[in-house]
Amino acid sequence: MLERAHWHSLNGVWQFAFDDGGQWQTPQQVTFDQTIQVPFPPESSASGIHDPSFHHTLWYRLNVTPELPAGVDAASQRLWLHFGAVDYQAAVWVNGQLVATHEGGHTPFSADLTGVWVPGQPAEIVVRAIDDPQDLAKPRGKQDWEAEPHEIWYPRTSGIWQTVWLEFRPQTSVSSLVWTSNVERWEVALQARIQGPITAETRLRVRLEVDGKVIANDDYEVLHADVSRTLTLRDFGIDAARRFLLWTPEHPQLIGATLEVVQNGEVVDRVQSYTAMRSVAVDAQHFLLNGRPYPLKMVLDQGYWPEGLMSATDEQLRRDVELTRLLGFNGARKHQKIEDPRYLYWCDVLGLLVWEELPSAYIFTAEASRRLTQEWVEAIERDRSHPCIVAWVPFNESWGVPDLPLVPAQRDLVRALYHLTKALDPTRPVIGNDGWEYVVTDILNIHDYSHVPQKLLNRYGTPEALQASLNQVRPHKRLIALDDTRIKAPAMLTEFGGIAFTREDDDLGWGYNRKTDAQSFLNEYTGLLAAVHECTGLVGFCYTQLTDTFQEKNGLLYEDRTPKADMRVLAAANRGERSALDVEKEGQLDDMGYDSVWRKKRQHAEQVAPPLVHSSAD
């Protein structure tokens, strides 16, 4: 979302050490006795260490000599060190000086190294990551607190697990961007923060382009650090003409943006970004995309890989988006994980809706509440400009608030994060507690793993059946809604199915229902999806799940991402007869569900994608 020409990936081989007793407090005390492949966690095989046992404290060290861009004066630049994510508490030293601390395992942080680093000289970077494996009061998502993965929890991901990079910035530069589109007014709002000295001659230029054609070119006087402006685009009015610019999964049109900070007539900083024209909302009976009802056909995505655990290469992230589209889904619920922003980038480019979900803590304390709030605020700040994100989910299945019916303070925390999310981003729906025990929500999401299609039809087949089910159906013996008044919100089935099917040589693991051969697996799946498509009481669904994940064998794909059944048949079931069969026969959709008119635009967007971020350190 904010890209400069001059940056350098630090991914690659670092020195590494475990410090289980927490005996070392400064870099000088550490004995580095191993090497690790960053950004993969030490629990993973991709890291080269592959040690899944309990480790409380980790140390990393890298020596690097940052090189200034050719022809750039060192005095005009500041050097920044960026971390995509370090789980859980990080401290960073450069050349022996503490330059940054950060708490939160899923959100980024940075350090200004100016004054610590001498141009042309080596820089020693040392990172300490403290990640108590049994701490249940931190947002940990699916990371297991037991020694071995059990039930629905998976191996831990500790330390550095997203990209690390260096970036040169001018003394006066753009430090953050937020984009917000308004389809009703055909406007794009920009919030930019300018860091560094601002003079009477400081200006900000903003240029928006689509397919090489300039659609806005504005120039603003910078009076103070925060610049908020609205760019009004030409509105052709009629839907057929507007369609050119509207972002949807079927034609994910992005708007390229170039921002330049100008001082005394000279460009001192230039960044590339992008946005899109799209809106999301709900009414009592619909999910609305760009003001029109849009059925959600989603899949639960855990975001784990066999080799890297929560870490993945850029190619793997892109491939998961492509596979999700090939399976006929138009969205993914990223479950208990704030995903690498490169995944969100590919969702923006390739057209996939995303629900972003806060990883849960598992006990209710004041400390857990503080940590959840802090990390959630940082996640929303990082991701709210991505057009693919269409909903925020702060809680799942009462995890971390296990006594909602009994403890008012726990209900207050759910309400607090719901309303805080609405305050930080009023443009998207918020789901208070996905699954059940609602006290407040914009969408009434229900988890129901019944494997009998007729039961799903009886419960959610009509709006009247749905209303009766709010009182009669108790998933996992939980009330769907706690409030005595019925929540006036559209309803979805956001976890269902979970059919386990494994290869003949793999009889381990589990699912919510198990099939022993490919045909019975496919028959049950298509029967469930046919029933869900008939449920007029629902505005969408989210199937459990995209891939097998460790001991959970209920994916449509194996853990290595190979399909368990004919993907064309699965896609037909997911899209429903009209979207997958009839429309495709008419030639309007390709295999990934794209409108043929927009296929070339998608291919062009892929060709101009920024460089891969998981390159080696050298």
Image (tube, rainbow, N blue to C red):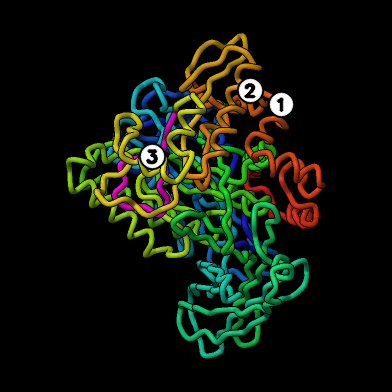
First reached walking from the N terminus: tag 2 or tag 1 = 2
Amino acid type, mark 3? Gly
State the SS at label 3.
loop
Query: Is residue 410 at all visible to an observer of this figure?
Result: yes
Residue at screen point 36% across, 21% down: 147
Residue range in magenta is 436-449
Amino acid type, mark 2? Leu
First reached walking from the N terminus: tag 3 or tag 1 = 3
In whole angstroms, how far apart are the C-alphas of marks 3 and 2? 26 Å
Amino acid type, mark 1? Asp
| 84 sits left or right of 98 in the view | right
Disc 3: CA contacts within 10 A as few (<14), some (14-19) or many (>=20): many
Is residue 448 located in the magenta-colored stretch of the structure?
yes
Instruction: Give the quadrant of the N terminus.
Output: bottom right
CB under 8 Å between callouts 2 and 1?
yes
- Residue beneath label 2, please? 522
- Residue beneath label 1, please? 566
| 223 sits left or right of 248 in the view | left
State the SS at label 1.
loop
Residue at screen point 70% across, 56% down: 251
- Residue beneath label 3, please? 435
